[in-house]
């Protein structure tokens, strides 16, 4: 999209030379042809290091935009970003793309739907009522059970198993709320990448990233009815037990275990080999690897056991 | 159904003039052609104001039925209501209805199924493996992602987005249990109405009402794996975060936020602009608007923080 | 599979007469043509009574294998069992089986998929986008709503209702982890049996057994978004409320009620007529029937109420 169009959509002023903007991204991840935004003053320090060619800012943040980077001044950069995100959303399906490619030895049910632009590797099994979206990619030897939906642009590796009724790549839960309490959708223009040798249970949901990628690394095991929020990273060989949930942008190191019905809040970093007992509520970063936690608020498992002893005494 | 048939199904006595009964409903909502019931003595006060033409009662409640309203006396009105509900259930599909109507500009996947009697508005996208039931209605510009099921008689507004594998209008969880512990289904003959500009995530379930309507109002945002029980009302612009659940007949005011994995019990009223933190367990009405709660049992969020301090002290 | 093949897969030594092994099973349930394994020294007492013809053991357990039973000595019997389980897994679909049988009066949507070898009873309704796997059986008068997936070999009784997007028989969550933290899948070669007059809500998941059967008995009511782990047994007329979960191999007696968002850990036995309040976390056996429990850790409901009183006092 041309910068001149963007300027008119967000209602900013700009009189420089028109340029092509290829996408939107966070300050940290934006490339030289992308637009970014400052949603909060706490991100001001990221402006200096951003490669974005254009940044949406309000009057307070304007002065921090370095030379060579175009500042578009708007009332509410976060809201303007949400409005703009719609224009960067690709079509859900695209008939101008070539028919789906199917690798040798793969068995595709006639009742599955492969959108144009999808690519299926070799020796896959794609069962009835599966949907694989535009430009989605499935590796070799992967089995996708009935009624699974894979949204456009998502990638599933080789030797994976995805069980029935699971959704890969539905929109992350993102919106901006105005003073009247009304919500404007932030289009989720990122994707999901699932690496090799991952097994995912039934009726699990893995949301696509707002920008960039929600990433499930090699060897992960995810059970049924699990929620993985947008922009999460699940480390190699991690185990997510049934009905647990991860809020957006949380990163698990390798071999993290999340017990049944446990949950994390967003934007956390969890050290490798951490174990969360069933029902744990994780609201803080875990820096030391190899420990076991429980409870909500979260505490070390041995502390939690001690607390149960205290409570038992209280009841006597 | 004729009253004479009803009388013979429930095993009551009645010798008056036969009349046509068009449906069943609660005492409060029944219209003049409908039948109602008194399941518990605490509802006796509602009998006086009911417009129902016929009421199932036991011997104790019989005397409260006003003149002009027909009392059918049975052993167990709640069980008899359950048995009767089956006879008022419409066919799941109905081939005598006209083929589905599709508005101009809508794109319907050949692998979607629109039951006879369904109506799709203009410029909608209905993707593969979607099912839209008999006499269900979808407004304009609405996107329904793959593998969504919309049961018969449900209504989805304009400018809505429903993500993959979500179910709108499956039966509410209703049954009557006899002394042997066996359950008799209460057929859920109501529907779901979703107003305009609502977005619902993947693998979420919104149950149809037993009578009347489960209502999701304008501008609501519902995340993945959320359960909305029968006869709930979710107020305008409310936000239901992943894996939260609402038991039946609870009403949220506008702009209520339910955090991840939070839950309400049934038959509650929640004031507008209430926020429930993640994992909250809501078991009581909230009358004052604008407050934030946490915990289970529920308490104000600042009290919950204080409690965590006390627990930390207990552990030292 | 021939024993000689098994020996070469697991890397054991055996010089006796080759025999046919028809399957794998636990020590307790193995029949005379089956292979079993000792995953942990605590199961040594089960070896004596096992009918298995072949048992995978390590050097420590070897001496407990009785005469007439073949001991295959391997480094890690549990890991070798996992590797072997793949070879006993049947094909997901099998074109050499006869076309699905459909009983008189049943209505099957042209957009449903019945795999070869499936059998549907009389007067059933199988709706669009349903998948019924190979050798799966559905009884009479059963209604299966859109987008339900029933995996191969599973059995659903008569007079059942299965709501949309539910999965019956996806793989239980089973794997063995090596010292590097990598997981090897234990193929789940058992099935799910649902007896008569069972109703299951939408987006619920019932996992198939690793060996044997995950069993839902007559008259059970299961709500939406419920997880039933592999090898669970749910007793007659039990009630599982929305978003509750059962870890593997737990047995509920008849008329157990699990409240919303409650959960059990695995390998438990719960007495008949036990009630678990919403959010209960059940981690121990319940021996006395008819009691009500709450909380996590679990306590009798009246104790839980007392605890809430103590906490309220603490806050004053």
Image: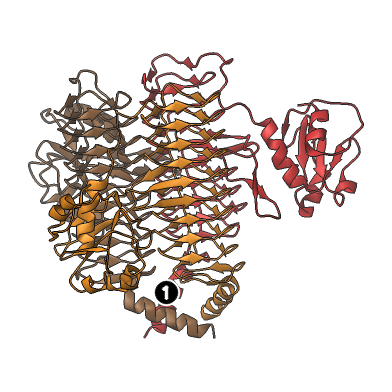
Chain colours: A brown, B red, C orange
Q: What crowding class fits label 1: few (fewer than 14 Cα within 10 Å), some (14-19), or many (20 or more)?
A: some
Q: Quadrant of residue B148?
A: top left
Along the line of sight, which residue is nearer the eye, A95 or B139?
A95
- Give the residue displayed 41% in from the left and 51% down from the top: C213
Q: Position of residue A144 (x, y in %)?
A: 27, 37
Q: Position of residue B286 (x, y in %)?
A: 58, 57
Q: Position of residue C93 (x, y in %)?
A: 30, 34
Query: Quick check: C51 above or below B171?
Result: below
Q: Which residue is mark 1?
A: B308
Along the line of sight, which residue is nearer the eye, A60 or B136?
B136
- Give the residue displayed 49% in from the left and 33% down from the top: C145
Q: Is residue B88 visible?
A: yes
Residue lying furthest left: A68
- As drawn, is A208 to the left or to the right of A260? left
User: Disc 1: which chain?
Assistant: B
Q: Position of residue C254 (x, y in %)?
A: 57, 58
Q: Is residue A249 visible?
A: no
Q: Quadrant of the C terminus of chain C?
A: bottom right
Q: Secondary structure at mark 1?
A: helix
Q: Quadrant of residue C265?
A: bottom left
- Give the residue displayed 19% in from the left and 21% down from the top: A97
Q: Quadrant of residue C130?
A: top left
- Give the residue displayed 10% in from the left and 29% down from the top: A17
Along the line of sight, which residue is nearer the eye, B254 or C181?
C181
- As drawn, is B164 to the left or to the right of A253? right
- As drawn, is C287 to the left or to the right of A176? right
């Amino acid at each position: 999209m041309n910068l001149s169009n963007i300027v008119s959509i967000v209602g900013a002023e700009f009189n420089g030379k028109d340029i092509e903007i290829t996408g939107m991204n966070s300050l940290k991840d934006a490339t030289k042809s992308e637009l970014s935004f400052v949603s909060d003053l706490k991100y001001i320090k990221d402006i200096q290091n951003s490669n974005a060619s254009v940044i949406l800012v309000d009057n307070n943040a304007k002065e921090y935009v370095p030379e060579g980077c175009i500042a578009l001044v708007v009332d509410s950069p976060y809201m303007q970003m949400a409005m703009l995100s719609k224009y960067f959303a690709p079509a859900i399906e695209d008939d101008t793309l070539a028919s789906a490619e199917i690798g040798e030895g793969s068995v595709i049910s006639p009742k599955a739907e492969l959108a144009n632009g999808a690519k299926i590797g070799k020796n896959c099994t794609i069962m009835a009522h599966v949907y694989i979206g535009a430009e989605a990619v499935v590796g070799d030897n992967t089995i996708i059970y009935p009624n699974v939906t894979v949204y456009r642009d998502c990638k599933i590796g080789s030797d994976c198993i995805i069980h029935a009724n699971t959704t890969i790549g539905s929109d992350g839960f993102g919106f901006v709320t105005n003073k009247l309490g009304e919500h404007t959708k932030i289009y989720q223009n990122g994707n999901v990448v699932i690496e090799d040798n991952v097994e995912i249970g039934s009726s699990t949901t893995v949301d696509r990233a707002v920008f960039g990628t929600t990433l499930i690394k090699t060897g992960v095991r995810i059970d049924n009815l699990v929620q993985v929020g947008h922009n999460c990273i699940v480390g190699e060989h991690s185990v997510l037990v049934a009905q647990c949930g991860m809020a957006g942008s949380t990163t698990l190191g390798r071999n993290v275990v999340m017990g049944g019905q446990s949950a994390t809040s967003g934007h956390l970093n969890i050290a490798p080999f951490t174990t969360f007992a069933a029902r744990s509520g994780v609201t803080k970063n875990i820096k030391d690897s190899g420990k076991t936690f429980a409870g909500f608020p979260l505490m070390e498992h041995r502390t939690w056991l001690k607390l149960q002893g205290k409570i038992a005494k209280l009841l006597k």
